[in-house]
Amino acid sequence: MSASPLHAKHYSAPTLIDLSARRPTLTPEQLTRSLCPSARFQDVRFRTYRPNPDFPSQAQASAALEAFAARAAQGHAQPGGLRLFRRRQPEGQGIYLDGGFGVGKTHLLASTYHAASGAQGPSQAAPKSASKVAPKTALMSFQDLMYIIGALGMLRAVETFKDHALLLIDEFELDDPGSTHMANTFLAQLMPGGASVVATSNTESGALGQGRFNAADFQRQIQGISSRFLAVGIDGPDYRQRGAVPSEIMSDTAFRAWTGQQDSATLALIDFRELGHLLTEVHPSRFARLLEGVQALSVSELREMRDQNVALRFVHFIDKLYDLGIRAAFSGAALDTLFDESYRHGAYAKKYSRALSRLSEMLQESRANAQQRAD
Ligand SMILES: Nc1ncnc2c1ncn2[C@@H]1O[C@H](COP(=O)(O)OP(=O)(O)OP(=O)(O)O)[C@@H](O)[C@H]1O
Ligand SMILES: [Mg+2]
């Protein structure tokens, strides 16, 4: 036997969460109930966004979204009042925020949510006059929106969101003709009724779908989508790496020490092979439920991924883990060897780079956390 493997089955704490035994279910209603910023973005606000002075597009994007949130909230009629005097909603507006990874797009999108829904910052009390009904606002990833439309059907999905003032869609990406058609139809049915939309993406709207499917054959649809949005670019370096070197994977010793520091009641421990198997059986829309109740996750024995499907599932999992703000530790292969070199220059290159950036940030957070505990 190899030297005392650190693994859920070999770990003595009986209360440890065993992810590999979970096969979560999810109804569309459960998914549509919680469309708000994830734990990591609960406390971000426009005022906590610090635009990089070397990249004026950051301050401009922040101001544009802040004004958009205020306008969308004002412009959308509040429920109630005499039907006779209710004016027809003007057509919803769209903003498409595109930029590289780590420039703060999700930070700004979540800030838009908080501003529109009247949420106060963590240290601020609600104003006494907060009796106004907040306009309905929902935030979700593009992938979740596709899942909702697929599960509810187009009619019910449009029905679900048509009374919303604002729909905030993170990580807008067209991976195939199916999602292109669904997104185009959904926006065309929703926005004329008055719902405004903010989308964020790593891809300029004109380049959506390129390299992933025969986008040229779907230009009319892609054009239909992009014509609904005012494009706002945001550029700059990855904020997560500001002043820091990309993080190294944890040594086995550091990994064990970190894992040992966690509360076993909310800790899940899994090796990479087992995680890979689990991710073939759980649909990405259920990853949040898979991780329910988990506050810390240790993934041991990371390996290089040579199958693009395996790699993309792992990327989706990392994205969700990051979003949920779950503490995480990883051991095994070095980060820069995880994804085959060819993937990093292919159609999904940005997804891989983004996942590496997020992995790196989670590792830095965990190291800092371990250090604090040790001090
Ligand atoms: N200008 C900024 N001021 C303060 N915090 C920032 C700024 N830019 C980014 N951040 C923080 O850095 C982290 C990464 O930002 P965020 O996730 O919003 O980037 P992103 O553009 O959405 O990246 P991705 O393409 O990976 O989704 C977050 O914790 C965010 O709050
Ligand atoms: Mg983001």
Image: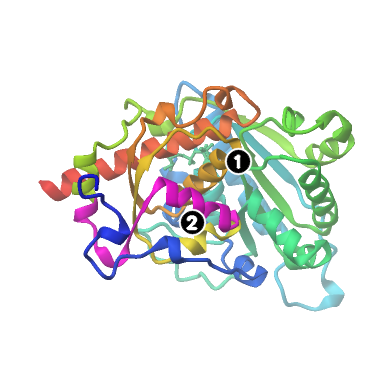
Please report the residue visible at 63 percent of the width from the left and 33 percent of the height from the top: 98
Tell me if the residue at label 2 has its CB under 8 Å from ligand 1: no
Provide the major secondary structure of the magenta segment: helix
**Element at label 2:** loop
Q: Is residue 310 above or below residue 120?
A: above
Task: Say the numbered circle drawn on residue 79.
Answer: none
Q: Is residue 375 above or below residue 204?
A: below
| Residue found at the very far left of the displayed protein | 375
| Label 1 packing within 10 angstroms: few (<14), some (14-19), many (20+) | few
Q: Which residues are magenta?
A: 259-284
Mark 1, residue position:
309
Amino acid type at circle 1 is Asn
Dot in front, 1 or 2:
1
Q: Nearer the viewer, residue 140 or 282?
A: 282
| Residue found at the very far front of the displayed protein | 1
Whether residue 44 is visible here, answered yes or no, is no
Q: Position of residue 38 (x, y in %)?
A: 48, 56
Upstream in the sequence, badge 1 or badge 2?
2
Q: Position of residue 213 (x, y in %)?
A: 77, 33
Mark 2, residue position:
38
| Residue 148: in magenta span | no
Please report the residue visible at 81 percent of the width from the left and 42 percent of the height from the top: 177
Q: Position of residue 97 (x, y in %)?
A: 63, 37
**Element at label 1:** helix
Q: CA distance from mark 1 to mark 2?
A: 26 Å
Q: Quadrant of residue 368?
A: top left
